[in-house]
Image (cartoon, coloured by chain):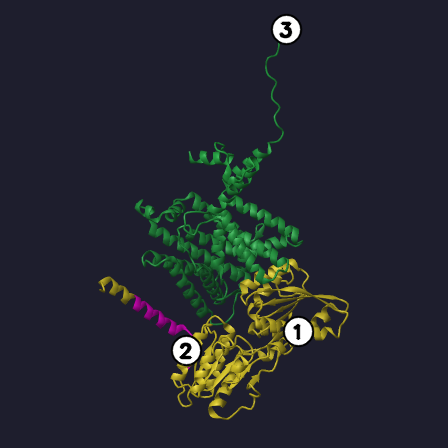
Amino acid sequence: MITKRTARLALVSSLSAATLIGLTACGGSAPASTPSEEKGLIGISMRFIAGNSWLSTMSDGAVKSGTAKGWTMEAVDAQGSAQTQIQQMRTFINKGAKAIIIEPVGDRNVASGIEAAKAAGVPVIVVNDRVSEELAKKVACNVHDDGEATAELVGEKAAAAAVAKKGENSTINLYIQALFPQELVTESRENGFMAGWNKYMEQHPTVKTKRIPNNYGEALPDKTLTAMRNVLSGNPDIDVVFNQTDVVMPAVIEALKGAGRMDQNGKTDVILAGFDGGMDVIKSMAKDPASPVVADGLNQPALQAAYAVDEAIAAVTGAPTGKCEGSPATRILPALAVTPENAGQYISDDLAFAGAE
Amino acid sequence: MATNTTPPPTARKPFQSLPGTITSLRTFVSSLGSKGYLLAVGAIVLLVGSALSQHFMTSRNLISVLITASVVSILAVGQYLVIVTGGIDLSVGAVAAVSSVIVGLALQQGTPWPVALLLALLTAGLIGIFNGLMIVYGGITPFIVTLAMMSIARGVAYMLQTGRQVAIEDQGFLAAFTANLGPMPAPVMIALLVTIVFAVVMAQTRFGRRLFALGGNAEAARLSGLPIKRDIIGAYCLSSLLAGLGGVMIAAQLTEGSAIIGEGYELNAIAAVVVGGASLFGGTGDPISAVLGGLIIAVILNIMDLLGIQAQPQLIVKGAVILLAVLFTSGVGNKLPGALRKVLFQQRYTGLPAHETPAGAETANQKEDANARR
């Protein structure tokens, strides 16, 4: 039996929930949906949107690109759950989406979503993270960057700057501020960076490299600050830092300042290299030709997203772009490392991470 | 001839006998309570650190550890205030993130830094009051209320930040929270001040004693006429307020407000409190022990970083340290030395297994136990 108190509580709860949902809808950014009924709907399911500025830049880039081309774009956040992403794909199919773009949660987990889309005749584009080769063959196009090749360019430029600063017959102490232990992106960026570094050092055999063991900041500024402080305490003579994501560059800089390796004006004898093309890092590089950040790897989330939209439209209209090739069909972003000399070209006030159409 | 019958003064032993020294040491350690174990463990950790890394005992490294531990120490004091009532606050990391974003955004708008600071602390305090109200009047358990608030506060922080970096360039603010304040950096001095203030509050004020009473037996406290609702709301408000202060301090250290900071801080603060000897059931512990617990964890992690130990074994060591520390600061741990002594000494003096003690023969420990029962 429902008492008056229970009914009142239920009413208050419902009102509160409705208010909260209303407020969230007013202030929030997802799901991003823009009406443009002529050409149809393209659904985008992202692994994360909330809490990940890089992925939200990608999501915003896809919405902006598709809308500009006359399509209705709807971006949703799978919150790291494969189940949610599969459900979102099914919902897009039910809503009559012409194509679906996914930034996949795991390489095999979303197989049933891809199968369902294939059965419904809805083309799927995979962007950024990769799916297994078997699944990759079932989608219209796989769009991603080449993180290892980009990191290789960064490694080469960092090595050149280090040799120029320390000279021949020197020993260079190299430290990589890494993301996560035993994780694919972390390892590919490390391998790429070291390949570029070693390639340059082969031409300078008298220079020795001393690797300081990696420490992991999990792409979080506060954890990176602690990790960097501890590493600098044990290794006060670090020469080069490869910071694997610009999201935590302020933490790296503050740790260097705290350890007395950088003055309050940002002058330091430590060479820095970054990744992801964080707009603040790019701006600081463009502003100061003698910037301590000598190179930054760009993976251009908004541009990747725009390529994915182009491939989705191509799959729907049957007019191929001619840039998604091979088996599995793949379109790869060219590797790109920005230096203080060319950083000015990539500045944009609309983006948190550099690179757009 | 008169003879001197006065007995010659007995020569005083220059040193106490070994058992006497051990007894004195044990009495001293007992008087320190859980802090005794913490200080002993802390001393061992410092010795080990010094032996293993030449960089450990440098002033730069020690100050770096103190600065790093300062934020978690402040959060641990706040967490302790809630745990002593038998509650828990899972929202402190997210509240720290919200505060950092609010202070950053306010400073970007040109707000004077003391006003920006007050705004961040006020928001944090209001979140704590909301938590307390939901627990007291909503009848929801603290775990659920603060779990929900963790999500809400983090979401608000993301929405406020809108994916952009919230850089902080206000030199007055940065100096207030990062420059040296007396002999030590400001974060360390702030943490020290917070710890002392709340140690005094818990030991010397009615509010502090009421929180102990509340955690010891909430029903008894209520029947005694204590204002338990007000005190619970007060405890959660203070916890959030301190989390807000922690968030502001991190923002100053990073020169940015960020919605992604403070992840896992709630668990670090809880770990510090339990390593400090407090029970999650409430009514025990003290803020100083909570801070010492956090410091021990921070120092151990620092030593492992200095030695270049990989992240995976570090996680195992951190977990093991928490378990061992709680074992030795809890009731079970306190009984362990006595139990070991019983087994070892009985075997040595009787030559018989512990369970075959001759009839009528009472061991020293049995006497001790019997006296204790009397």
Calculate the distance from the C-alpha at mark 3 to the C-alpha at mark 1. 104 Å
Chain given the colour yellow: A
Q: Nearer the viewer, mark 2 or mark 3?
A: 2
Q: Hey, what amino acid is under mark 3?
A: Met
- The CA distance from mark 2 to mark 3 is 115 Å
Q: Do tags 2 and 1 sit on the same chain?
A: yes
Nearest to viewer (mark 3 / mark 1): 3
Label 1, secondary structure: give it.
helix
The numbered dot on residue A87 is 2
> How many discs appear?
3
Residue span colored magenta = A13-33
Query: Can you identify the residue that label 3 sits on?
Result: B1
C-alpha distance separating marks 2 and 1: 41 Å
Q: Which three-letter amino acid code belongs to the residue tagged 1?
A: Gly
Res. B303 image quadrant? bottom right
The residue carrying mark 1 is A155
Q: Nearer the viewer, residue B4 or B148?
A: B4
Q: Looking at the picture, how far across and down is residue B222, in whole percent?
A: 32, 48
- The image shows residue A39 at horizontal and vertical percentages of 42, 90
Coordinates of residue A345 in the picture (x, y in percent) = 59, 80
Vertical order, A328 against B195 (above or below): below
Task: Inspect this view and state whether residue A68 appears.
Answer: yes
